Amino acid sequence: MSKSSSNSIGPWGQYPDTRPRRNRRHDWSRRLVAESSLSPSDLIWPLFVQEGEGASTPISSMPGVERLSIDRAVEAVGRAVELKIPVVALFPATPTELKTDDAREAVNPDNLMCRAIRAVKEAHGDAIGVLADVALDPYSSHGQDGLVQNGYVVNDETVEVLIEQAKVQAAAGCDIVAPSDMMDGRIGAIRRGLDASGFEHVQLMAYAAKYASAFYGPFRDAVGSSANLGTGDKRTYQMDPANTDEALREVALDLAEGADMVMVKPGMPYLDIVTRVKQTFAAPTFAYQVSGEYAMLTAAAQQGWLDGQKVMMESLLAFKRAGADGILTYFALEAAELLR
Ligand code: PBG
């Protein structure tokens, strides 16, 4: 949040006594009066993992982003540690043959995700936090985040599976569990499930205000769920982009249910939500600059239409200005390099 939180414009003088450009004249002065700042500690790096060894697969809709086998992911996380990035968020590209209607691979304690969590924690310990996404879409044959019955994603039955998924991830050693599924009541249910299994220290970052967005397309390519989802969408559980008040209700519920941190997603088109959530609840608030946002900026930069580094840094700073305490971004490594 910006240093000046007052809404009043104040008793400023008039031109020519007042010349706002004076403060902007020199770089040192611009730095002095800057209200927001960006540091590597603000960044969470989403990382896609795949099976294999020494393997990596480019994701065509996200130039510069690759899925990495666990050994390569461990190395890459080492880079994030050096750059002082506080958290890495892992996402699995589950082999197609393991995807089922009931997404049972999600609760397999030896699934790709859990093996990746264990390997990263073994290699890097508490030098970096590991965030694990909770939702069924990387494991389901239909690409939905929950269980489907008669064409509808059922809530309470899904929550039961999500509790088990969170528990296997916690047992594998993840530090933060991040439910991205948007089922009702899942934060409280997962909190109780974790606590009952001795994981009361595992933090919960709720994807609290997550919208049914077309900006997730490239992510679904990355985890291989777009083909499964087909023409389906997630509008019966993710939020309508038309709504703001509803975001506040979602955040209020998740905080009441025990969320330690809340998230708004997508990012850039939803900065108004970030600001309103931060101002209303004063809770740790994060924004996810999602795959489609990364794709847009990167594509324009590749065409030479935008200066890639500049728009990257400007977009990340804009999240801070809007009130975010941190940003999940595929640019995390590149931005942290520049911030060194
Ligand atoms: C899983 C999940 C999604 C994203 C994060 N977790 C996809 C979705 O909800 O369809 C999207 C992230 C991105 O687009 O970068 N539920």
Image: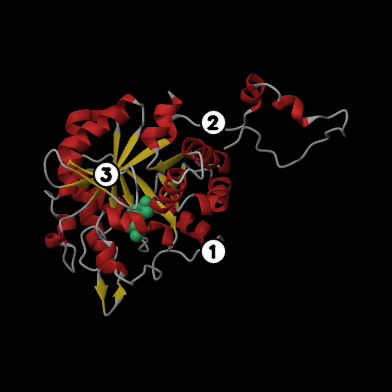
Q: Is residue 41 above or below residue 146?
A: above
Q: Earlier in the sequence, mark 1 or mark 3?
A: 3
Mark 3 is on which residue type? Glu
Q: State the image quarter where residue 40 is shown.
A: top left
Provide residue 237's location: percent of width, then percent of height.
39, 67
Residue 311 left/right relative to 68: right
Provide residue 314's location: percent of width, then percent of height.
53, 38
- Could you say which disc has been placed on residue 66 in the image? 3
Q: Residue sitting at 71 percent across and 42 percent down?
A: 7
* Residue identified by numbered label 2: 37
Provide residue 318's location: percent of width, then percent of height.
55, 41
In this rendered view, identify the residue nearer to me: 28 or 190: 28
Foreground mark, 3 or 2? Answer: 3
Q: Is residue 146 visible?
A: no
Mark 1 is on which residue type? Asn
Q: Is residue 69 above or below residue 212?
A: above
Q: Earlier in the sequence, mark 1 or mark 2?
A: 2
Q: Quadrant of the N terminus?
A: top right
User: Contact (CB < 8 A) between labels 3 and 2?
Assistant: no
Alpha carbon distance from label 1 to label 2 = 29 Å
Foreground mark, 1 or 3? Answer: 3
Label 2 SS: loop
- Could you say which disc has been placed on residue 243 in the image? 1
